[in-house]
């Protein structure tokens, strides 16, 4: 009868592999010939194409300054969140083009794109951005309208007579 295997070392000896040695994934920075990193961010119906490069912290969205395109301070704060979490405020210039959706969805899309581009530019920032949940695409979208109803869930007003 065959011997019983009780430990990982015994299993590795049988398989001819060292099971204790883990493979660590070493991530390389991804940059183009101009020293920029590119990423696509999405939120609701908005899609943002984002390029980041080392600079003074200037943010341009669809050819306009950040405070001109996103006038509300809340939306500006959303865009700055990845930089504050990663601890690199004012170190990168951002060029973004965004289409679709409303301003809130567009701000979320640019935030998602900035986060992905930051972790591509400097892989050591990935842990902080992932822990904050900025690398995950927010999959919530508007629920469709159903037939026989006024909106997605709202029904018509009930009339007794």
Image (spheres, rainbow, N blue to C red):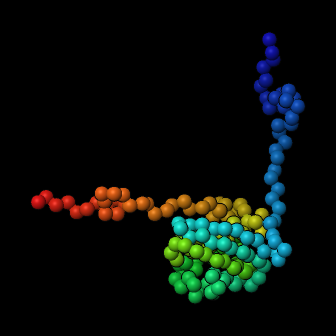
Query: How far across and how far down the image is residue 143, in percent?
Result: 43, 60
**Is 77 left or right of 92, judged from the image as shown?**
left
Name the residue rendered at 20%, 60% in the picture: 158
Q: Is residue 28 above or below residue 37?
A: above
Residue 156's place in the image compared with 69, above or below, is above
Identified at 81% across, 65% down, the residue is: 29
Q: Farthest residue to the left: give it.
A: 161
Q: Residue furthest front?
A: 147
| Picture coordinates of residue 69, whole percent (x, y) | 57, 84
Determine if residue 122 is in view.
no
Give the quarter of the image for residue 100: bottom right
Q: In terms of image quadrants, where is residue 157?
A: bottom left
Disc tally is 0
The one of 1 and 107 positioned closer to us in this rendering: 107
Q: The C terminus appears in which quarter of the rendering?
A: bottom left
- Residue pictured at 31% horizontal, 63% vertical: 150
Q: Position of residue 140 (x, y in %)?
A: 51, 61
- Residue 140 at least partly seen: yes
Q: Is residue 146 left or right of residue 29?
A: left
Residue 4 higher or lower than 13, as above or below: above
Q: Quadrant of residue 119?
A: bottom right
Say which residue appears at 78% left-offset and 20% top-offset.
4
Look at the image and tell me in which quarter the N terminus lies: top right
* Left-right relation of 143 to 87: left
Q: Is 43 drawn above or below residue 14 in the view shown?
A: below
């Amino acid at each position: 009868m065959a011997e019983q295997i009780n430990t990982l070392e015994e299993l590795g000896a049988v398989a001819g592999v060292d099971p204790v040695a883990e493979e660590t994934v070493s991530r390389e920075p991804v940059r183009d010939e101009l020293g920029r990193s590119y990423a696509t961010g999405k939120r609701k119906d908005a899609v943002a194409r984002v390029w980041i490069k080392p600079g003074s912290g200037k943010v341009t969205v669809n050819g306009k300054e950040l405070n001109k395109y996103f006038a509300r301070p809340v939306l500006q704060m959303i865009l700055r969140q990845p930089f504050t979490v990663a601890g690199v405020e004012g170190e990168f210039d951002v060029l973004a083009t965004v289409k679709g959706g409303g301003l809130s969805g567009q701000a979320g899309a640019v935030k998602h794109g900035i986060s992905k581009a930051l972790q591509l530019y400097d892989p050591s920032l990935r842990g902080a951005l992932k822990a904050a949940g900025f690398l995950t695409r927010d999959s919530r979208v508007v629920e469709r309208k159903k037939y026989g109803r006024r909106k997605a869930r709202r029904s018509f007003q009930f009339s007794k007579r």
